[in-house]
Every structure is written in structure tokens, then in C-alpha cells.
Amino acid sequence: MRPLAVLIPTRTDAFLQRLLWSVVAYSDQLVGDHRLIIADNGLSTGATRRIQSWAIRMVCVQVPEPFVFARAVNLAAAAAPPDADLLVCNDDLEFASMRPLTTFRELLAREREHGPTVGLLSAAIRGGVGNPDQRGEGLKAGEVGLTPYTLAFVCVAIRRETWDAVGPLDEAFVESSFDDADYCVRAGQAGYGLGVTADVVVRHHGGDHPEAMSGTLRQRCTPEERTARFEAGRRRFEAKWQKSHEARTRI
């Protein structure tokens, strides 16, 4: 199995410790083939020191202002081992199932044996998510369900082959919205499907509306600013792909 790099963009101390503690609580050691990469755009000095003291395989990379989610993910991915699969995680979630990182590695290894079908794999989301398929309802243990709709990057694994073929996230989406939808469309054009597993469960503490975005933005933006960002990202997506956005955007 390939190593797994967990990419966590953040700009606030408010959420990160809960996420990291959930990794420890559910018995995935932060050593060996797991590496956590914190894309830091505003953590306090104390929080950074605590993170760096947890494990030698947890590192921070600095993300310049203004905060752009796509850029934060790309900088974290650039710090990952070149052969590692990638797991993009919002900072405002926590794992709620056993061995989540190991389970992702095992599922990705199994999908790799069956060809390029699934290139992106979402955990089952409990909480706010735009694509209801990402709730993983009705999926059996060990089953990967395909979705024809774009995945919200709440907790999504990207196979290394997919990342190498599709490239990094498009940093033109400066609003930090629809960058994930754009990536899913590009992955689909490259021949990779989008999957969901119920073997990894996360609780997402964002709102039930897509404009809630990740915790990093909820901490720094008013509801009106979040809505404006969401609408600007939607317009950018529609202009790029010449397709209208629906509640669940088809790839």
C-alpha cells in the first residue's frame, strides 16, 4: 500500500485540536505510513508548537495571505511524499470510525488493483455536505458507491495517479468555493470516477448550507461574506465549464 498524506488547511486554533485528537482516539498512530501536513494560515505560535511536538511525521507549511483553499491544499500536497496518496480534510471535522487513515489506505489499494475507476473517494459525512451521496447511506461494509455528482472536499482521498494526471487544484478559485467541483469535473475528464465509502465516517461541524464552507472561513467571514464568496465561485465555475450549477453538480 502507498503512504497516505493528510492535508489540512486551517487558519484558526478553534477546530484543529478536535480533529487531531479524533485521529489519536480512533487508533491511527501518527507514524509509519501516515503523515499529517497542516497548511497554516493563522495558527497561533502556541498551537504550532503543540502540533510539532505531537509526532515527527506531523509538519506545518506556511500559507500566505489571502487565504485560498486551493492554494493551501496545493502547498500541503507539494510537501507530501511524491508517492503518497492524498487525503484532503476540512479542519472542522472529526473522525468517528476506527482506523480511518488505515482504512482509506486499504480501500485505495483495493481500487488500484481494479484499474483507474475510482480516483477520488469520500468518507461518509455526518453533517453539512452539498452532495447527499456523500452521506454514504445504504452502503455496505467494504462497498464503494459511485456518484455522478461532484464531491465536496470535506474529507476526500485523491489517489496519487489521479493527482499526477489531473494536476493541482485551480487557484483561480480565489473565493475558496467550487474549487472542489472544478477538480471533480477535471478528474472525470481524465477518466476517474468519484466514490463514497461508509467504512470511514466523519462528523462535519460546518453548517447545512454549502455557503457555510470550512471552519477556516466561518471563523473569518460574516454570513453575508460567505454567501458572496459562494456565489462568486459558482459564477467562475459556470463561466469555466459553460454549465449551470445545480444543488448537486454533475461531472
Image (cartoon, grey):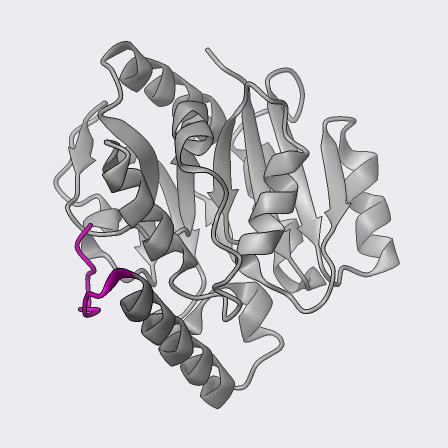
| Camera-nearest residue between 221 and 96 | 221
Q: Quadrant of residue 136?
A: top left
Residue at 34% over, 63% down: 128
Asked whether residue 16 is in view, the answer is yes
Q: Is residue 97 left or right of residue 87?
A: left
Q: Quadrant of residue 119?
A: top left
Relative to 35, residue 149 above or below: below
Relative to 10, residue 194 above or below: above
Relative to 89, residue 167 above or below: above
Q: Quadrant of residue 222?
A: bottom right
In the image, the segment drawn in magenta is: 241-251
Residue most toward the left? 138
Whole-percent x and y of residue 18?
60, 51
Residue at 76% over, 29% down: 55
| Camera-nearest residue between 220 and 80 | 80
Residue at 33% over, 75% down: 235
Whole-percent x and y of residue 34?
59, 24
> Magenta: predominant secondary structure element?
loop
Whole-percent x and y of residue 242?
22, 65
Report the label total: 0
Q: Is residue 135 left or right of residue 163?
A: left
| Camera-nearest residue between 97 and 179 | 179
Residue at 43% over, 21% down: 105
Asked whether residue 209 is in view, the answer is no
Residue 242 part of the magenta segment: yes
Residue 60 part of the magenta segment: no
